[in-house]
Image: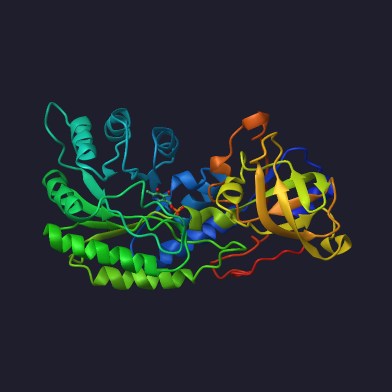
Amino acid sequence: MEKFASANTYLETNRPDRPVWGVRPHAAGRAARWFLKHFPGEVAYAYKANSSVFLLGALFGAGIRQFDVASIPELEDAATIPGVTLHYMHPVKSRVAIRRAYHEFGVRCFALDSEDELDKILGETSRDGKAPKDLQLFVRIAVPAKNSRIPLERKFGIAGAKAAKLLMKTRQAADELGIAFHVGSQTTTPDAFRTAFAEVHKLIVKAGVVIDGIDVGGGFPSTYIDSAPAPLSAFMDTIRTAMEQLPVTEACRLICEPGRALVAEAESLIVRVDARKGSDLYINDGSYGALFDAAHLGFVFPVRLVGRPAESAGPLAAFELWGPTCDSIDHMKGPFLLPSGIREGDYIEIGNLGAYGRAIAGGFNGYGKYDEVILLDEPFASVYGGPGDGRIATGGK
Ligand SMILES: Cc1ncc(COP(=O)(O)O)c(C=O)c1O
């Protein structure tokens, strides 16, 4: 893939017709190195967040060797990376998926949140009617979402007496018994983890079982215009302290599965303005593409004018964005601050879109096709203490 110093350098010689991914593998590598150094346990990347080979290569190069997968296609892809361990942490899996994961791909670590799922896992991993002795089973518990942009608590997780019962039953079958939770994606304060650990503590006492592993899931934040998180180091401190207070032995594993925090900074999208109507800009990607979270969850991604000097285009003004399809829900309300003189034919770089942007993009109306380049400059903002730490740049430099 071609490399450019920045989106502006790329646009000096290109006027792309399609939206263009600006991939920054160095940002993913930096994030992974930070997590491997500061998380007080094992780090598994949540594959669903972004499976660009350039980012996977950067994560692998930084030392990531564990991946959390959520489907058979993800498993098939991730299994091509040599020497990695794959965990299947989706609490609801089809029988075929469990069977293939265990027998074909060597997965041993599974999440579950019901007795039915436990029965499915045991049924599909048995050989000649005998249950396997090498299963690592993590019971996913429901924990309250606090300051999370995308709570996951209603869809997954078991709680209270039912959770204690499931832990006891799973203990009979598991070689390693774990407890997993997810505080919700883009959780901006570490108290969500403190509360989750308090639930874990209560459950371990209630169930009276030995716990071999705690999986704190993902949820670690990135930075967006409308979402400034507490420093990541505060999350690490909270988790370290909470882990020390649990009634588990020193041998108990601690695992995390960050998706967003490892890749959000590592991709921008360069889009073109195809029309302007007052403060409405019609661009060539939208809610059916990489901007799903901007349209449906109200994320305000950082933006800047690229391809010509921002200073030449006037002071910043608030804009709403509309995607290219014929559908009226293809709308990103923002507000997105861009120079007031922005016009048809201009390009905008939309930043910190590496988590779930590419992964979600579909092909409605024939869109959903992107060009790609590597960008060597820094992301708009970084939670990793690099240049631009936590600050969102809006200029067109
Ligand atoms: C089981 C599991 N682990 C990890 C993640 C990654 O979460 P995040 O991107 O918020 O770090 C998710 C996201 O949905 C998940 O469902």
- On screen, residue 248 versus residue 273, left or right, reads left
Q: Position of residue 113 (x, y in %)?
A: 26, 45
- On screen, residue 379 versus residue 306, left or right, reads left
Comparing 308 with 303, the one in front is 303
Q: Position of residue 54 (x, y in %)?
A: 57, 46
Comparing 232 with 290, the one in front is 290
Q: Position of residue 195 (x, y in %)?
A: 32, 67
Q: Is residue 326 above or below residue 274?
A: above
Q: Is residue 342 visible?
A: yes
Number of numbered labels in the structure image: 0
Q: Is residue 394 above or below residue 44?
A: below
| Coloration of the structure image | rainbow
Identify the residue shown where x is 15% and y is 41%.
133
Q: Is residue 3 visible?
A: no
The residue lying furthest to the right in this view is 312
- On screen, residue 255 versus residue 320, left or right, reads left
Q: Quadrant of residue 182?
A: bottom left
Image quadrant containing the N terminus: top right
Q: Position of residue 226 (x, y in %)?
A: 60, 63
Image quadrant containing the C terminus: bottom right
Identify the residue shown where x is 47% and y is 50%.
60
